[in-house]
Every structure is written in structure tokens, then in C-alpha cells.
Amino acid sequence: MNPGLIPATILTGFLGSGKTTLLKRVLTEAHGQKIAVIENEFGEENIDNDILVADTTEQIIQMNNGCVCCSIREDLRTTLSDLAEKRRKGELDFDRIVIETTGLADPGPVAQTFFIDDEIAESYLLDSVLTLVDAKHAGSQLDARQEARLQVGFADQIFISKSDLVDPAEVAALQHRLKHMNPRAPQQTVHFGEVPIASVFDLKGFNLNAKLDIDPDFLNADDGHDHAHHDHHDHEHGEHCDHPSHQGHHHAHDDDVKSFVFRSKRAFNPAKLEDFLGAIVQVYGPKMLRYKGVLNMKGSDRKVIFQGVHQLMGSDLGPKWAPGEDKGSKMVFIGIDMPKDVLLQGLEQCLV
């Protein structure tokens, strides 16, 4: 892990969910960090000029507490490389960046920028995708807009705002629905965008590193049942949900963004797995939002940690399997109408 990399956070969320409130808080709270904010949108929700000092014709605005703010005029890649260069030359001083996307954007392409481009990958490390969900309007937004569902699918962390405006049963039903769409993102209800900085930065949600495999939220993000005794893959979260209190609820929403888990105690044949996953992302990549896993590979005494966004995937050697540790693989796939059976059968056939 290169300590010189600049951590990047993507902040996405529904219109009116409180992204600006959250950003303002992050920018004005005295945490001693200098943050560069990149606004990937123009219009209604821009950061208010009252916390900016300086004339907004300037593309990069230095704020009174040392933070930096800029709007994307060209593409994100150019903006990121400009910022990194100014930082190297000592013209700008910042510790991390936050990219705020528009309320209607799919965060996928923004996340992909950090994978595709070598120059960007040499300067930045994508820390996590944070999604703000407005409890009051979430139901109708998720029903009506695929972008809203994509934002949930991409999240490493979900913040639910305005939960005080709806009754607790409704919040619980929303949380349940979000869990179906994305079991690996922890959810937190927040009040008026007041989120402790520790919940926002350095979440390591996106990193391909050893952190992932001790991340209990990911490895235990279970789908309501214990299949530990099966040497077999899981049911989709929701097929046999044991949450009687919302029994009527989640059948009403058959969201196109769904997740499923594959588990096995048998090792993977590395060549077969690579071929299979390569073929799958060629065909289904655009529908695959996030996928991530800890794998037991034949011939390796170390865990293999893999993840991807759309067509791009990468893997890394993790720590060694501990003596006596149960070797096994677990993968989580989140995507739009993915062919679950094709994937599960194909993965099964890659086992040794």
C-alpha cells in the first residue's frame, strides 16, 4: 500500500438527501484535515458560497479553513490529475479528496476512473463510495429511478437521513429493502447530515488489501440464515427471508438491483476461475455493479482478495491462512438482473 496515495471518497445520494449538509459539516468541522472537494454537478445543490471565500470564476477555490473546492469543467480524470500535480508542486495543500456526484448520477464511471487510469491510480486510492438515502422519499425514488438503485448497489456505506420524519416501521422496512440490494454496505441513520468524521473517511471500503478479510461487516453480512454447515452456495437474500415482521413488505419490491453470495469450502482452480470471470464480465459487466470476495485458491497458502466494478476487476494476495483456519471462499455480487444461476453454476465448476 503506497502511503503517498491521496485517499478519495465518492459521495453520492438522492436529491435532497442531505449531501450538501454532510459536506458542509465535513468541511467546517475542526478535524485538522485539509480536504479537496470536487463537485461533479452544477445547479441546485452546490455548496453554498458562504463557506467559500473567493470569487467563483476561479476553478479551484481555497476555503477559509484550508480546504479546497472545485467544480469539474472537463472530465474527472483531468481535474484529478491537475489537483495531484498542484499538490506535488506545493501549490495546493490537501490530505484527501471528496467527489460529490449529482443526485441523478450512476457512481460507477466515477469509481472506474480510479481503476482505469494508471496516472490516477499512482496518485489516488479510492477509499469508499458513500450513499445518502432520504428516508422520507426513498420508497418512491427507488421505485421510479434506476439511478437511485444503482447508488445503493455501489455503496460501501449507506447513511439514511430524515429518518425522524417517518415512522420507525417504515425506516425498518427501508433498511430491509436496502439490505437486499446491498448486503455488504453497513447502514447508519444520521440526523441532519451530522455524521462523525470517523464514519466518513478511511473506511477502506474499496481497498484491495488485507483489511477486507477482517472486515466483519463484509464477511458476516449474512442473509438472515446460517449456511455455515452447507458446502454450498446461498439462497438469494430474500428468497426465504425470516423476518416475519416485514413479511408483506419486501415482496412488494422486486428491485432490479440485487445481491447474492457464493460460498464454498473447496478451493478454486485459478486458471478456470480467471477464464470464467473474464468471460462473465465481458458479457454482463455493465450490469455488474460491485463484486468482491475472499478466495481460497489451490496452490496458494494466502487468501486471494478480489473485487471489481463493472468490467474492471483486480485481485491481490491477502494474508496467509492461519493454522487451523477454515479455508473457504466467499463472494458477494451486486448487480442489475444478474443471471444468478449461470454465475453460481459456473463458479461451482471452477472448484477443484
Image (cartoon, rainbow, N blue to C red):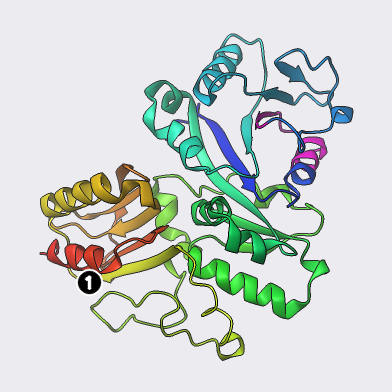
Q: Is residue 291 left or right of residue 97?
A: left
Does the segment drawn in magenta span residue 93? Answer: no
Q: Is residue 174 left or right of residue 268?
A: right
* Residue 230, percent from left and from top: 27, 82
Tell me the residue at 22%/71% (across/down). Answer: 265
Does the segment drawn in magenta span residue 35? Answer: yes
Q: Is residue 29 left or right of residue 3?
A: right
Tell me the residue at 47%/80% (across/down). Answer: 224
Give the SS element for disc 1: loop
Q: Amino acid at mark 1?
A: Lys
Q: Is residue 343 left or right of residue 80?
A: left
Q: Quadrant of the C terminus?
A: bottom left
* Residue 51, percent from left and from top: 86, 30
Tell me the residue at 38%/61% (across/down). Answer: 337
Identity of the residue furthest to the front in this view = 144
Tell me the residue at 60%/85% (across/down). Answer: 246
* Residue 222, percent from left and from top: 45, 74
Image quadrant in which you'd find residue 93 = top right
**Which residues lie in the magenta part?**
23-41
Asked if residue 25 is positioned above or below residue 319 in the image, the reply reads: above
Asked if residue 106 is positioned above or below residue 301 in the image, the reply reads: above
Residue under pointer 1 = 265
Image quadrant in which you'd find residue 347 = bottom left
Q: Quadrant of the N terminus?
A: top left
Asked if residue 349 is positioned above or below residue 77 in the image, the reply reads: below
Q: Is residue 201 visible to us here?
A: no
Characterize the local packing of mark 1: few (<14), some (14-19) or many (20 or more) Cα atoms within 10 angstroms.
some
Identity of the residue furthest to the bottom in this view = 244
